[in-house]
Image (tube, rainbow, N blue to C red):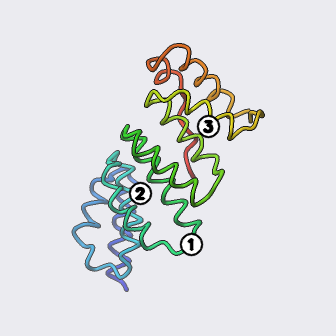
Amino acid sequence: DNASSAVKDLASIHAQQGRFDDAIEVLEKYRSLVDKQESVDNLLVNFYEGAGRHKETLPLLKRQLKAAASADKKAKIILHMGDVYRRIEDYASAEKQYKRLDKVQPGNRQAVRGRILCLTHLGRHEEARELVKSALRGTVAPNDAPLVEAIRAAGAGGPESSTQSVPETEERE
């Protein structure tokens, strides 16, 4: 449908120009003209994040999670939700999402790393250390070495050193 495409194209052009709030406004105002509402939700998630309005993505992600058919799709959405909660510094909710992901996709390294970061921010250093031990089974991948060192330092120096020395997780694709 031409109207549907025009709305999404206009919003995308605004976003490409870094005008995320304008893109969001177009989608919200003309949402009813778009055939597939899931595509509007996907665009809104991206545009809210581009605008730094991370909290506004959560209701959309929750709706997407309910509609997700495959375990892989559910896993991606749960990971995304964990990352959003972490960005807004709601570490308890983020940790719950990462833990939830472990039930859907056991051993997901991004979830384990995110959970360790959250536990460290929450001052639950012993849990973080145990999770590192069980997840890495004595071997540390090169990109995990700074995380392990930060957890060691956090345990020695208290919660303040944990928030300063723990690196961010890698961005999802």
Image quadrant in which you'd find residue 142: top right
Front-most of residues 90 and 172: 90
Q: Residue at the spot x=75%, y=37% of the render?
A: 137
- Residue carrying label 1: 70
- Residue carrying label 3: 131
Q: Residue at the spot x=50%, y=22% of the render?
A: 162
Q: Residue at the spot x=56%, y=14% of the render?
A: 156
Q: Measured from the top left, where is residue 91 in percent x and y?
A: 41, 39
Left or right for 19, reference 126:
left
Image quadrant in which you'd find residue 44: bottom left
Looking at the picture, which amino acid does disc 2 mark?
Answer: Asn
Q: Residue at the spot x=63%, y=51% of the render?
A: 108
Q: Measured from the top left, where is residue 22 in percent x and y?
A: 27, 57
Front-most of residues 163 and 26: 163
Left or right for 108, reference 100:
right
Q: Earlier in the sequence, mark 2 or mark 3?
A: 2
Q: Nearer the viewer, mark 2 or mark 3?
A: 3
Looking at the picture, which amino acid does disc 1 mark?
Answer: Ser
Could you tell me which secondary element the residue under label 1 belongs to?
A: loop
Compared with residue 32, is residue 48 higher up or lower down, i.e. above or below?
above
Left or right for 133, reference 34:
right
Left or right for 65, reference 108:
left
- Residue carrying label 2: 46
